[in-house]
Amino acid sequence: MVKRVNKTLKVLCINLLLMTSAVGSVVLAPMGIELTYNIISLLTPGAEEQRAALPNYAQLDWAEQHFQDLEGTSSAYHDFVIWKSEPYESPTLNIGLDGLRDVVQAPNVGPHEVWLFGGSTMWGYGSNDANTIPSHLSQIAEKQVKNYAQPGYHARQSLNELVDIYADPKQATTPARTIIFYDGVNDVLDKCRATNSTSGTVREQQIRTAVSRNMLSPAMILMPALALIDQIRQAFDKRLMNSGYVCHDDPVRAEKIARSLVNDWRSADAVARRNGDRFIAILQPVSYLSETKLDHIDLFRDGWKEAGLQYQSIYPAIRRYAEASEFEFYDFSRVLDTDGYVYIDFCHLSPNGNQLVAQRLAPLVGETP
């Protein structure tokens, strides 16, 4: 009898050990693959670092360091704006405790402030702190500039951020400001994907899935493996099958996205004026619609040709709705028509491109409202 019990316990222990090993493999194997991939990525130059070799950066010795620094940045969830950059310090890129990127201010600036909102181009992807659009604008216009842009932001997120800023009692005591929204690229790129909604951010599905999970469900065991599969799928999609854009074949959706962006600008204008400030909306340039040197980048690799069709479909509608509105609007989609190399991909700019944009912005903020 005792032998039978011991034998049964032994079988149970072996089965439990085997089951635990199987579960552990499902959980740990994807983590190990991810760790190995990250180590290999650190040892081999990636697409980000390869941008430092573009002719745009031929005379800039900090370019390689900057693209390495970009790899260290991160963001965290924030209600209403969805995400915001985490504090960060590096030789070329510094983000404060408030999540805002540093601006190199011109000396002896006056009390009038210029607040800039937008996505990663305004934030300064591809440039060190001294060469972002906000820093160039401060130097050219001799104004105090704040960079409220965040990578990936839509105009709706910037609008929510603006509302949050005005909730601070300190803002009520400062002189009138100029508020500039620099938008177009992200609203079109994200909302034209068939898998995304026309009103949500690019992370809508990710957040919805995360909050709906039951942390005690046995299915959570599979999450590392599913996450790895999803990363592989996304990488494959970006490199070989970057399709799924529908606005060029769906004029109703294209019009809706254009109206949504302009309505966000209209709301931001109302909020700014209610607080005694001036609002300016800028339709940002994109390489697909620019007449400039693009032979150094391949805009048609990875299926990006289809992405270009979205801008050709929606930008005219954005202009039409914005020009019919009462807020101050400027179309910058052709301000980078130049013989130089200014783009480093379909929308981000090297320092010379940022300077060109700042030069066009400077006269707009030259007079204090």
Image (cartoon, rainbow, N blue to C red):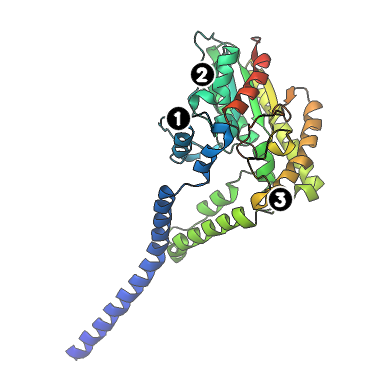
Residue 15 makes an appearance in the image: yes
- Residue 175, given in percent of the width and then of the height, sits at 57, 10
Residue type marked 1 = Thr
Mark closer to the observer (3, 2): 3
Relative image position of residue 34 (x, y in whole percent): 43, 56
Q: Work out whether 124 lies above or below 241.
A: above
Tell which circle, 3 or 1, labels the residue nearer the N-terminal end. 1
Task: Residue 235: give x, y in percent of width and height.
Answer: 56, 55
In the rendered image, which residue does mark 3 sit on? 245
N-terminal-most mark, 3 or 2: 2
Left or right of 211: which side holds 30?
A: left
Q: Does dot 3 land on a helix, a strand or a loop?
A: loop
Q: Quadrant of the C terminus?
A: top right
Q: Give me the C-alpha separation between circle 3 and circle 1.
A: 35 Å
User: In the drawing, what numbered circle is on residue 92?
Assistant: 1
Q: Secondary structure at mark 2?
A: helix
Please report the residue visible at 60 percent of the width from the left and 35 percent of the height from the top.
Answer: 348
Q: 342 above or below 254?
A: above
